[in-house]
Image: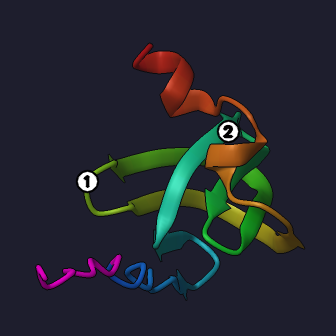
Amino acid sequence: MLDEKRFTKPAPKEVIHNVILENRKRLTLSGIEDVDSFDEETIVLFADSGSLTVKGTGLHINKLSVETGEVSIEGEVDSLVYTDGESGKTRGMGFLARLFR
């Protein structure tokens, strides 16, 4: 009899999500999967655990790295609101998905 090899799927890599807010003027995020929408008052991002809405005034995305999932935002940050739910990949096409179609 031949030995049956069992292939196990590797465990999904845990994505670490960090938030650093400096003086309400500079926001650095990691573990971001997608950017859904943005303007000077609202930026909607998707992380593994759900969506993150950043509200403020004069918001600008200075750095966006798709490979590392890092985002750097400048402007006056008024609020960060998390919404539980599915990740951006299953919610529909986000900004980056539409951009790289």
Instruction: Specify the color scheme.
Output: rainbow
**Farthest residue toward the front?**
1
The secondary structure making up most of the magenta span is loop
Amino acid type indicated by mark 2: Asp
Q: Circle 2 is placed at which residue position?
A: 36
Q: Is residue 70 left or right of residue 18?
A: left
Specify whether residue 48 is in view: yes
Secondary structure state at the residue bearing disc 2: strand
Spot occupied by residue 38 in the image (x, y as percentages of width and height): 68, 37
**Quarter of the image where one finds residue 82:** bottom right
**Quarter of the image where one finds residue 8:** bottom left
Q: Is 92 or 44 nearer to us in this picture?
A: 92
Residue 4 painted magenta: yes
**Farthest residue toward the left?**
2
Secondary structure state at the residue bearing disc 1: loop
Q: Is residue 29 left or right of residue 76?
A: left
> Label 1 neighbourhood size at 10 Å, few (<14), some (14-19), many (20+)?
few
> Label 2 neighbourhood size at 10 Å, few (<14), some (14-19), many (20+)?
many
Marks 1 and 2, how far apart in space?
17 Å
**Quarter of the image where one finds residue 54:** bottom right
Where does the magenta region start and end? 1-9
Spot occupied by residue 68 in the image (x, y as percentages of width and height): 28, 63
Spot occupied by residue 95 in the image (x, y as percentages of width and height): 59, 29
Q: Is 42 or 44 nearer to us in this picture?
A: 44
Residue at 59 percent of width and 44 percent of height: 35
Q: Circle 1 is placed at which residue position?
A: 67
Residue at 70 percent of width and 34 percent of height: 39
Q: Earlier in the sequence, mark 1 or mark 2?
A: 2
